Amino acid sequence: MPFIDSKITVPVPQEKREVLKEEFGKAMSLFGKPESFLMVGFEDNYDLYMGGKKLEKGAYVSVSLFGSASRAAYESMTERICKLYEEQLGIPGKSVYVTYHGVNDWGWNGSNF
């Protein structure tokens, strides 16, 4: 039950959303999670500030997982997310924050896991 939610300062065209979504799906193997349950959200043209200054190009990415993963998996995912945002949107890794949230109670389709 992963959910990847991104707040991004730049416009994200539909074709870039598709590429990011597909790459996030492939990255689920890092967590041992199936892509079939992955939910992805994008909020572009979002105002972000870092160090008191507005970022022209920046992103905040929140990754929620049912359960948790290893520190190595989180490290690999952060590396992959930063690389994708730089390649696809021109956002440097130094302007990307990634957080991870392990969730013990996750509901879907009228019941909880």
Image (cartoon, rainbow, N blue to C red):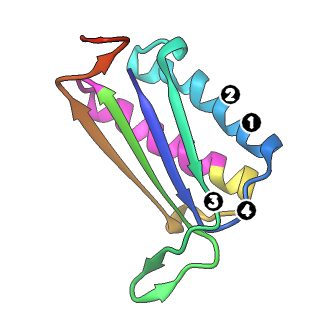
Q: In this view, does 73 lie above or below 79?
A: above
**Mark 2: which amino acid?**
Glu
- Predominant secondary structure, magenta span: helix
Give the SS element for disc 4.
Answer: loop
The label shown at residue 102 is none
- Give left or right: position of 66 versus 94: left
Looking at the picture, how far across and down is residue 65, in whole percent?
32, 28
**Mark 3: which amino acid?**
Asp
User: Residue 70 is drawn in which quadrant?
Assistant: top left
Q: Give the range drawn in magenta.
A: 66-84
Q: Name the residue under label 1.
A: 19
Looking at the picture, how far across and down is residue 19, in whole percent?
74, 36
Kindly check if marks 2 and 1 are in contact, taking CB atoms under 8 A apart as contact. Answer: yes
Give the quarter of the figure containing the N terminus.
Answer: top left
Looking at marks 4 and 1 on the same chain, the residue that comes earlier in the sequence is marked by 4
Give the SS element for disc 1.
Answer: helix
Compute the Cα span from label 4 to label 2.
Answer: 18 Å
- Count residues near mark 2 (Cα–Cα under 10 Å), then give few for <14, some for 14-19, many for 20+: few
